[in-house]
Image (spheres, rainbow, N blue to C red):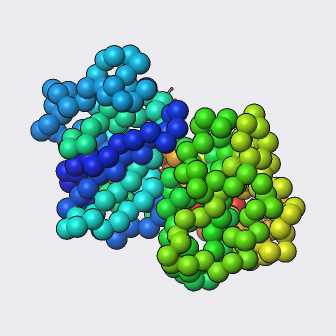
Amino acid sequence: MLQRAQVKTNRALCREHFVVSFTVPSFHAATPGQFVHLGADGEDHANGANVTASCARPNASSSGQGFAAPFLRRAFSIAGLRQAGEGIEIDVLYRTVGVGTHWLAALQPGDAISVMGPLGTGFAKPDPKSRVLLVAGGVGLPPLQWLAESVRHRGGRALGVSGAVSADLVAVPKAQCVSAIGDLRVALEATSSPHDSSPPWLIATDDGTHGFHGNSVDALGAVYDRFRSSLAGWTVCTCGPEAMMRAVSEFCLKQSIPCFACLERAMSCGTGTCQSCVVALDDDQDPQGWRYRLCCIDGPVFDSSRVRW
Ligand SMILES: Cc1cc2nc3c(=O)[nH]c(=O)nc-3n(C[C@H](O)[C@H](O)[C@H](O)COP(=O)(O)OP(=O)(O)OC[C@H]3O[C@@H](n4cnc5c(N)ncnc54)[C@H](O)[C@@H]3O)c2cc1C
Ligand code: FES
């Protein structure tokens, strides 16, 4: 579904991460792991009139210039979705790295953007029996954040490990940050309530300036060392840099833990036409033992044990 959305808020979470919320009149049912393809709204943005940098946003204001919308749409995981009056409000969490994300950071409440979605195949729909340990690295947080909320909202259990380079790049809301592994015990053993859908996240930083000292794969190993028996039957879901997801996948294979990874591939069309987003997957039915799938329609979520990293 392609439609015009209106930006409601656009605010900083930390030095480089922002969350933009926008409203659309309606939206097909979506599951965590699915994504939207965002672009300029043709009418309002054709001459760049609405994409002037905001002084309130450090990355946008530092250059003192406006940011033109990218020629191609950019894919963003849905980080949250809720009914808002007559419409639907969608959150997208992003890290400012290039043309598209600087354009996003410059958007103001009331600006119009073009939204295509929901796209892709997400994580399995959670139920009260879901037990999910999330492992996020960098800007891999958004799909896992919505997954965790959905799992807990349906009475399942979810907790996360979120890695960042340093404390000033942690995008998890402060109230959900856990600094010590021992503090995860309550979340592991308590039954979650639909009224408290905010999961706890163990923060790991490469430089040790917040929480666990190490990356999110080290933190995952440490959490399993500490709580192995309580985590029997849990599934790991991961999103972040591909090298990190590969390491998470290898850890899970060794430990016989089911693991699903939400991949990011360069996506031009997002709808299965351009073939730019292939992923090689093991496939017993294929004579060569593997075949390509499209990240934008068969994924972005895949059983990580089948991905040819
Ligand atoms: C299914 C899917 C979901 C995605 N979800 C999100 C999301 O929730 N939030 C989000 O921020 N992005 C997400 N992305 C990535 C997003 O589509 C953009 O590629 C990314 O935000 C960079 O776009 P840009 O136009 O700012 O950078 P570009 O101008 O395209 O790239 C500028 C430079 O930054 C580098 N670069 C690109 N991405 C990154 C990165 N993540 N970290 C460091 N350097 C980078 C490029 O190699 C290039 O050198 C997702 C991608 C896919 C396929
Ligand atoms: S992005 Fe075009 S086929 Fe996947």
Residue 236 falls left or right of residue 13: right
Q: Is residue 184 visible?
A: yes
User: Residue 183 placed where, x, y %?
Assistant: 76, 62
Counting the numbered discs, the total is: 0
Figure quadrant of residue 209: top right
Q: Nearer the viewer, residue 5 or 61?
A: 61
User: Residue 264 placed where, x, y %?
Assistant: 52, 46
User: Residue 208 placed where, x, y %?
Assistant: 77, 38
Tell me the residue at 64%/53% (across/down).
177
Q: Nearer the viewer, residue 262 or 231?
A: 231
User: Residue 3 placed where, x, y %?
Assistant: 20, 54
Residue 37 falls left or right of residue 174: left
Tell me the residue at 59%/64% (across/down).
199
**Relative vertical location of residue 250 with respect to residue 54 in this rendering, above or below:** below
Q: Residue furthest front?
A: 175
Q: Nearer the viewer, residue 298 or 243?
A: 243
**Relative vertical location of residue 86 with respect to residue 144 in this rendering, above or below:** below
Q: Residue furthest left?
A: 43
Tell me the residue at 61%/35% (across/down).
168
**Relative vertical location of residue 220 with respect to residue 47 in this rendering, above or below:** below
Tell me the residue at 51%/78% (across/down).
194
Q: Residue furthest right?
A: 225
Q: Is residue 286 visible?
A: no
- Quadrant location, the N terminus: bottom left
